[in-house]
Image (cartoon, rainbow, N blue to C red):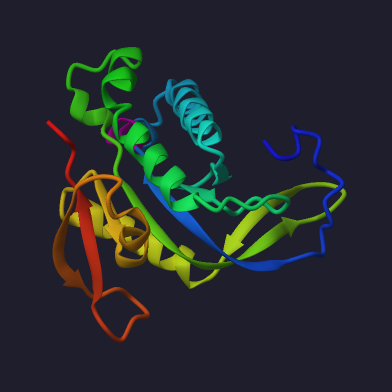
């Protein structure tokens, strides 16, 4: 979306350290199953999924940094040419909307069980290196690199293991207090960490 927005003149060589919020989003089970079966619908169904995620992410000022893997990485406050002082709040609002996509996707994919369209997310705030990867003249993409991104990715695995819609890190929780109701979970050990990481789950309002 950055290149399509006419921002190709941003300096490819510039990298900046800043605080931002990273969201990791896992593929719904339906898409994983289509890939496993080599079902011909996989491209159109994944395109629909990617389009909806991109629109919601853009709505809250974020960037989809990766469409290709079995997860999507979304960045808030990671735009190479802008600063977002409320990146954690925007990331959380986006994450709420993504979790709420289940019914719409199940209907459009004509699934008998909505569970196949369930989205699980993780949210983490911290320092990242913001800039560009790839080549300046042929193909490039914005990037947010660092431990913050690594932790967000591993927390998505925690969300899946604990069967939760959303897992929020301590650093993100500190930014979001008062914005919603969260419940503390037992600290977890993550790869690359010497101490357990404090995490929270989002508790939707009834």
Which part of the image, by quadrant, shows the C terminus?
Answer: top left
Q: Is residue 21 left or right of residue 106?
A: right
Q: Is residue 206 left or right of residue 179?
A: left
Q: Can residue 76 be seen from the camera position used here?
A: yes
Residue 204 x/y as whole percent: 18, 38
| Residue drawn 84% across the image and 53% down it | 136
Q: Is residue 101 magenta?
A: no
- Marker count (numbered): 0
Pick the residue in front: 105 or 60.
60
Pick the residue in front: 185 or 156.
185
| Residue drawn 29% across the image and 55% down it | 177
Q: Which residues are magenta?
A: 28-33
Q: Residue 3, relative to residue 47: is it above or below? A: below
Q: Residue 118, relative to residue 106: is it above or below? A: below
Residue 123 x/y as whole percent: 37, 54
Q: Is residue 70 left or right of residue 141?
A: left
Residue 89 x/y as whole percent: 42, 47
Q: Residue furthest front?
A: 178
Magenta segment, principal secondary structure? helix
| Residue drawn 47% across the image and 26% down it | 52
| Residue drawn 60% across the image and 66% down it | 18
Pick the residue in front: 90 or 165.
90
Which part of the image, by quadrant, shows the N terminus?
Answer: top right
């Amino acid at each position: 979306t950055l290149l399509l927005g006419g921002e190709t003149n941003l300096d490819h060589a510039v990298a900046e350290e800043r605080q931002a919020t990273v969201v990791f989003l896992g593929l719904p089970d339906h898409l994983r199953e289509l890939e496993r079966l080599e079902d011909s619908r996989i491209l159109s169904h994944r395109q629909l999924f990617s389009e909806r995620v991109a629109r919601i992410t853009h709505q809250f000022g974020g960037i989809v940094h990766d469409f290709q893997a079995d997860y999507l990485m979304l960045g808030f406050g990671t735009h190479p040419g802008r600063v977002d002082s409320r990146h954690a709040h925007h990331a959380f609002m986006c994450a709420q909307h993504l979790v709420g996509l289940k019914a719409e996707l199940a209907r459009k994919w004509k699934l008998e069980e909505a569970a196949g369209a369930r989205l699980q997310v993780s949210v983490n705030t911290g320092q990242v290196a913001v800039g560009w990867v790839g080549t300046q003249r042929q193909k490039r993409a914005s990037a947010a690199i660092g431990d913050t991104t690594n932790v967000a990715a591993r927390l998505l695995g925690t969300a899946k293991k604990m069967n939760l819609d959303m897992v929020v890190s301590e650093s993100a929780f500190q930014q979001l207090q008062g914005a919603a109701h969260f419940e503390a979970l037992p600290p977890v050990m993550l790869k690359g960490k010497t101490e357990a990481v404090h995490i929270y789950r989002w508790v939707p309002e009834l």
